[in-house]
């Protein structure tokens, strides 16, 4: 088996709906989370736009009571088999990462790539981000058709 350099592994395969599992340094939790790529053409964009999945549905819902309901997207294990539990995506929080951030995490063995998420689910996540009053306009513009 040929070892593929991390840069090639990420840059050759990243697309809308790519899912990565890693620890986010800005979180108080040191547990890895699932992050979903929302960019339409991530390899061409300057920054990768990611949303984070959580199985702590009540906690996330409580934190976002003031936000429109469509900004919280539930995804079941039936819809996306990688998720073992009912999962919520908070579309009021978008993580902007340079692609090299993902490459570096992979090179350090701190990132795992998962099965791609179905386009319809990614479209729902984009709609959630666009509906959020907390997301800056330039991010919304990158995600619109």
Image: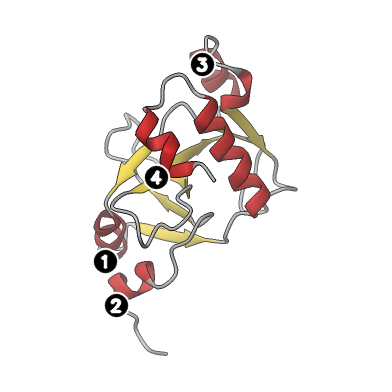
Q: Is residue 125 above or below residue 64?
A: below
Task: Measure the alpha-carbon separation of dots 3 and 4.
Answer: 20 Å
Of the two numbered discs 1 and 3 on the same chain, state the one appearing first in sequence: 3
Residue 55 picture location, percent across and down: 57, 34
Kindly state the secondary structure of the residue where label 4 is placed. strand
Kindly state the secondary structure of the residue where label 3 is placed. loop
Q: Which residue is mark 3?
A: 64
Residue found at x 39% / y 45%: 49
User: Mark 1 or mark 3: which is in front?
Assistant: 3
Can residue 66 be seen here? The reply is yes
The residue lying furthest to the top in this view is 66
The quarter of the displayed image where residue 127 is located: top right
Of the two numbered discs 4 and 2 on the same chain, state the one appearing first in sequence: 2
Residue found at x 54% / y 39%: 126
The colouring scheme, among rainbow, by chain, secondary structure or one colour, is secondary structure
Kindly state the secondary structure of the residue where label 2 is placed. loop
Task: Measure the alpha-carbon separation of dots 1 and 3.
Answer: 35 Å
Q: Which residue is mark 4?
A: 49
Q: Which residue is mark 1?
A: 107
Does 31 sit left or right of 145 as displayed? left
Residue found at x 51% / y 56%: 16
Of the two numbered discs 2 and 1 on the same chain, state the one appearing first in sequence: 2
Q: Is residue 56 above or below residue 43?
A: above
Q: Residues at badges 3 and 2 in contact (C-beta under 8 Å)? A: no
Q: Which residue is mark 2?
A: 5
**CA neighbours of label 3 inside 10 A, class few (<14), some (14 to 19), many (20+):** some
């Amino acid at each position: 088996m040929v070892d593929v350099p991390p840069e090639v592994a990420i840059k050759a395969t990243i697309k809308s709906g790519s899912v990565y599992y890693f620890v986010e340094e800005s979180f108080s939790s040191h547990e890895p989370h699932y992050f979903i790529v929302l960019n339409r053409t991530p390899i061409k964009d300057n920054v990768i736009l990611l949303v984070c999945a959580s199985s702590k549905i009540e906690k996330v819902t409580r934190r976002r009571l003031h936000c429109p309901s469509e900004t919280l997207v539930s995804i079941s294990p039936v819809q996306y088999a990688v998720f073992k539990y009912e999962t919520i995506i908070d579309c009021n929080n978008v993580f902007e990462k340079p692609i090299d951030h993902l490459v570096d995490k992979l090179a350090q063995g701190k990132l795992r790539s998962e099965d791609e998420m179905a386009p319809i689910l990614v479209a729902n996540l984009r709609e959630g981000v666009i509906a959020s009053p907390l997301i800056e306009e330039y991010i919304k513009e990158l995600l619109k058709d």
